[in-house]
Amino acid sequence: MSADKHPQRKTEIHGKAREAFFVQDYSPGPRIDGVEIVELKRFNDDGGAITELGRFTTGQHEQLPGFEARQINYSEMEPGACKAFHMHFRQTDVWYVPPSDKLLLVLHDCREGSPTEGATMRFVLGDGKDRLVRIPPGVAHGARNIGQHVGRIIYMVDVQFSADPADCDEGRLPWDYLGSEIWEIARG
């Protein structure tokens, strides 16, 4: 007999539980203007997998129009480590975290006059997904490794790094600029 012919009875719960009950919201949070998330294709076979991080036509990234990579970097984070907040005035970052890793990414729009000035985005990179995230200049960004192993970030930038203070485009905000709780695992 089909399950459709016998609908489930709705279970009633007592008042205290009913008052505390809520439905978790799985919809994406508000976006920061200029932040782009690109879902990537992963090609698997019985010998392994490949993920194409980008195709470049005369320096331009095909999936992220207007972005021209000038440098590609690789970074590692120990489990539990938090590296935040970085910010650039000219540089755009494009981040990729392998699907086997799990990093909590926090972005905060510090651009005066931006349509999303003061907005914060908080989401997980890696965790079984292949995605690129474009982080525009003026958006503070940081990550916490919430996985059990070393977390890795491969990132492309459109401004080459310079350690010369007169030319350096990387600045910092305190790790707890948005409060230390921003880095905690959401409970519930």
Image (spheres, helix red, strand yellow):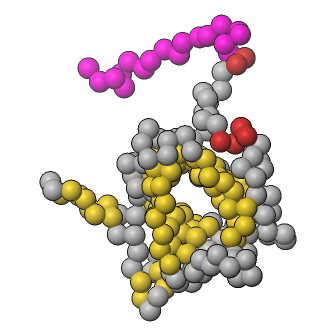
Residue 47 percent across, percent down from the top left: 15, 56
What's drawn in magenta, residue-wise? Answer: 1-18
Residue 25 percent across, percent down from the top left: 61, 38
In the foreground, 158 or 111? 158
Q: Is residue 58 magenta?
A: no
- Camera sees residue 52: yes
In the foreground, 93 or 165? 165
In this rendering, is residue 159 above or below 19?
below
In this rendering, is residue 6 above or below 28?
above
Question: Quick check: 154 left or right of 134?
Answer: left
Q: Quadrant of the C terminus?
A: top right
In the foreground, 8 or 121? 121
Question: Quick check: 150 left or right of 25?
Answer: left
- Camera sees residue 28: no
In the foreground, 174 or 40? 174
The residue positioned 47% from the left and 55% from the top of the image is 76
The residue positioned 58% from the left and 70% from the top of the image is 93
